[in-house]
């Protein structure tokens, strides 16, 4: 136990009489300075207990990996995870990303390191990541908890965090959420150490690590103003406090600047981090946000991403990102009251007990793991967040007098508000789960201390707050994504992943299951049609394309493929109709123009075909050679 730490009975529990004193400046060696910057284990801190908790976290994660080792859900990375895995594989081969980064690049580079060790095996990379994050996160949370809780409370906090279903789940998903949770915990640990013994060097290291965290999840920028206020509030001279704040912000800027310079070199435009921020801002703040929020990968996503490119001034992803942001701000200025109402609603939903889905719904994965079914459920209340959030509120209230608790609670609230500027979902609050668990255990500790001290008024206050908050966060919640059949989308996503990984048998089975679950899922019908096309089963392929168009009349890709099937059967007039409809629905569909030109060539209308091929070539370079050949043929005639 640290020498300066004492435990006082009562509802406020542990107090510290020496943690926040400013040491007088003294000349020390560089080695001593460096040793003070990073957490070290001291004999009194119970490092053996921490080691046991690390093993506990590894065992739980190992059991989860063993349970899911043969589950189809985990065989291939899905949706965003597939994008990250592909980027990581390319980086591992030394192939860089063209243009500005679409997503914050930190996780892709971490994953590429794991890919060097795990190769092309998705399962091995999952195992490496999970068995790296689980013990590291447990150890860091133990170090933070020992500064705020009793030894027993710290053990409970790490044990509960290791059993928190969403955190357990995302530690083995190839997504940046769980790595960000580890980094956020590390940032807060360094910040607490800097608050205990303030120095420019400690705050600089804290800022550097916060900058690294930003490279994984951009919304962790919300930590910076909270920590800056904390640095300013430490007991020191005004000039010294200003240097601490500058060191914190400067450290983050030192990490972000090379990324911005790299983006500028790649595209000639300034992009501080990535080009997906404007897209997400538009999704959560446009007038039809309840519609854009339900946009899923596939046709709907492609249609959304085409919106800025319909403007003549938009030439690349950077322009598109800025256009999305401009359109969102236009909507906000047009209806500021609606924006504020929407912001409050999203901020409250962020703390609701339900795990809000984004591209995939965690509740749909429960049947693959007994451990996940035990730690994530929605029978009577939304577990675990329906329990953790009310307890965390009690913990924050009970220990509010302690500066570290104010920092942790402020970081959680600021992050929730920052995410609410975009849109809330389960994945986006995973980086805060260790903080929520710590505060929840503090809440349970406060209730126990008040009960033992027979402070019945305080017991009544905390129990009342717990009940009110518990009812609020467990109320039924209606959300725009409720209209989505996530089970069908999950099977379709598995089919796409299997298709990309050249597993056609699994892909076909997944597409068929997706169609069985939701026959109106146009993307699944379209994807199944492409499988039949490759298998030379034109009749079934045509049926699938027709079903996709019946479900979504604006599905231009299905119309192109249906047109090809009709042309192969000699129904040229019907094929021309489908190509014309596809061109009208999507003026950026190069395949529609190219196939339209091919059918016109069958009619001998080469001059018209040339015009269509020119439009296709303007959209995609691969059609230029074909266009030039037809132009020469027309000129000879």
Image: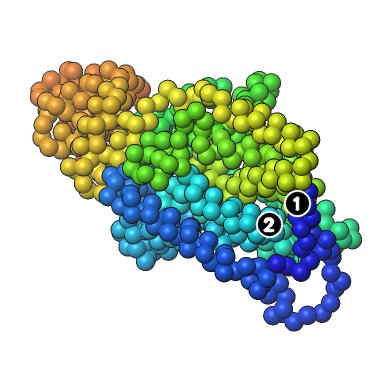
Q: Is residue 632 above or below residue 264?
A: above
* Label at residue 13: 1
Crowd class of label 1 (few under 14; some 14 to 19; many from 20; radius 10 Å): many
Q: Position of residue 159 (x, y in %)?
A: 54, 53
Q: Is residue 13 left or right of residue 500?
A: right
Q: Position of residue 187 (x, y in %)?
A: 64, 57
Q: How is the image coloured?
A: rainbow
Alpha carbon separation for disc pair 2 and 1: 8 Å
Residue bearing the label numbered 2: 150
Question: To which quarter of the image does residue 198 belong?
Answer: bottom right
Determine the residue positioned at 25% across, 27% down: 515
Element type where label 2 sits in the image? loop
Element type where label 1 sits in the image? loop
Determine the residue positioned at 23% across, 18% down: 577
Determine the residue positioned at 69% across, 34% down: 463
**Viewer-nearest residue: 234 or 594:** 234
Q: Is residue 81 left or right of residue 76?
A: right
Q: Is residue 92 left or right of residue 626?
A: right
Q: Is residue 498 above or below residue 533?
A: below
Q: Position of residue 117 (x, y in %)?
A: 37, 66
Question: To which quarter of the image does residue 246 belong?
Answer: bottom right
* Label at residue 501: none
Q: Is residue 5 above or below residue 588?
A: below
Q: Position of residue 215 (x, y in %)?
A: 56, 54
Quadrant for the N terminus in the image: bottom right
Residue 281 visible (yes or no) = no
| Label 2–label 1 contact, CB within 8 A | yes
**Viewer-nearest residue: 356 or 251:** 356
Quadrant for the C terminus in the image: top left
Residue 147 visible (yes or no) = yes
Q: Earlier in the sequence, mark 2 or mark 1?
A: 1
């Amino acid at each position: 136990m640290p020498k300066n730490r004492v435990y006082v009975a009562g509802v406020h529990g542990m107090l510290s009489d020496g943690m926040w004193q400013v040491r007088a400046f003294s000349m020390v060696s560089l080695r001593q300075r460096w040793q003070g910057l990073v957490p070290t284990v001291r004999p009194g801190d119970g490092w053996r207990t921490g080691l046991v908790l690390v093993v506990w976290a590894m065992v739980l994660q190992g059991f989860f990996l063993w349970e899911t080792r043969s589950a189809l859900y985990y065989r291939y990375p899905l949706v965003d995870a597939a994008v990250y895995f592909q980027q990581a594989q390319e980086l591992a081969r030394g192939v860089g990303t063209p243009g500005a980064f679409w997503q914050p690049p930190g996780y892709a580079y971490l994953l590429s390191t794991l890919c060097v060790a795990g190769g092309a095996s998705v399962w091995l990379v999952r195992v490496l990541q999970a068995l790296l994050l689980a013990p590291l996160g447990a150890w860091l949370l133990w170090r933070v908890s020992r500064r705020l809780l009793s030894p027993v409370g710290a053990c409970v906090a790490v044990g509960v965090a290791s059993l928190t279903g969403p955190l357990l789940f995302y530690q083995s998903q190839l997504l940046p959420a769980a790595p960000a949770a580890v980094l956020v915990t590390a940032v807060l640990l360094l910040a607490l150490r800097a608050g205990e013994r303030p120095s420019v060097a400690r705050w600089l290291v804290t800022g550097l690590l916060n900058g690294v965290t930003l490279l994984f999840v951009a919304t962790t920028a919300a930590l910076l103003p909270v920590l800056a206020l904390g640095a300013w509030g430490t007991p020191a001279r005004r000039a010294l406090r200003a240097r601490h704040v500058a060191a914190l912000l400067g450290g983050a800027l030192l990490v972000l600047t090379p990324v911005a310079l790299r983006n500028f070199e790649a595209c000639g435009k300034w992009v501080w981090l990535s080009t997906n921020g404007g897209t997400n801002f538009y999704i959560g703040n446009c007038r039809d946000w309840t519609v854009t929020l339900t946009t899923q990968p596939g046709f709907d996503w492609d249609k959304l991403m085409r919106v800025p490119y319909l403007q003549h001034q938009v030439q690349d992803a950077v322009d598109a990102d800025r256009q999305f942001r401009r359109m969102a701000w236009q909507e906000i200025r047009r209806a500021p009251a609606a924006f504020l109402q929407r912001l409050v609603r999203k901020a409250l939903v962020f703390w609701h007990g339900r795990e809000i889905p984004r591209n995939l719904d965690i509740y749909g994965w429960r049947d693959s793991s007994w451990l996940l079914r035990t730690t994530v459920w929605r029978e009577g209340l939304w577990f675990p967040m329906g329990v953790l959030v009310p307890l965390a509120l009690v913990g924050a209230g009970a220990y509010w007098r302690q500066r570290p608790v104010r920092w942790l609670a402020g970081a959680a609230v600021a992050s929730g508000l920052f995410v609410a500027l975009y849109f809330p979902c389960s994945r986006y609050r995973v980086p805060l789960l260790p903080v929520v668990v710590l505060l929840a255990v503090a809440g349970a500790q406060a209730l126990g201390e008040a009960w033992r001290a027979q402070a019945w008024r305080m017991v009544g206050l905390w129990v009342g707050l717990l009940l009110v908050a518990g009812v609020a966060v467990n109320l039924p919640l209606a959300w725009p994504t409720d209209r989505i059949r996530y089970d069908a989308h999950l099977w379709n996503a598995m089919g796409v992943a299997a298709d990309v990984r050249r597993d056609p048998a699994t892909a076909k089975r997944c597409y068929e299951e997706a169609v069985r679950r939701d026959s109106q899922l146009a993307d699944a019908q379209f994807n199944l049609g492409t499988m039949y096309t490759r298998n030379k089963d034109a009749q079934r392929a045509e049926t699938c394309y027709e079903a996709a168009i019946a479900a979504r009349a604006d599905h231009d890709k299905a119309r192109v493929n249906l047109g090809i099937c009709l042309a192969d059967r000699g129904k040229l007039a019907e094929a021309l109709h489908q190509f014309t409809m596809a061109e009208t629905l999507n003026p950026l569909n190069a395949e529609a123009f190219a196939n339209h030109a091919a059918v016109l060539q069958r009619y001998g209308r080469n001059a018209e075909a040339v015009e269509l091929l020119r439009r296709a070539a303007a959209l995609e370079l691969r059609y230029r050679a074909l266009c030039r050949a037809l132009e020469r043929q027309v000129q000879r005639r």
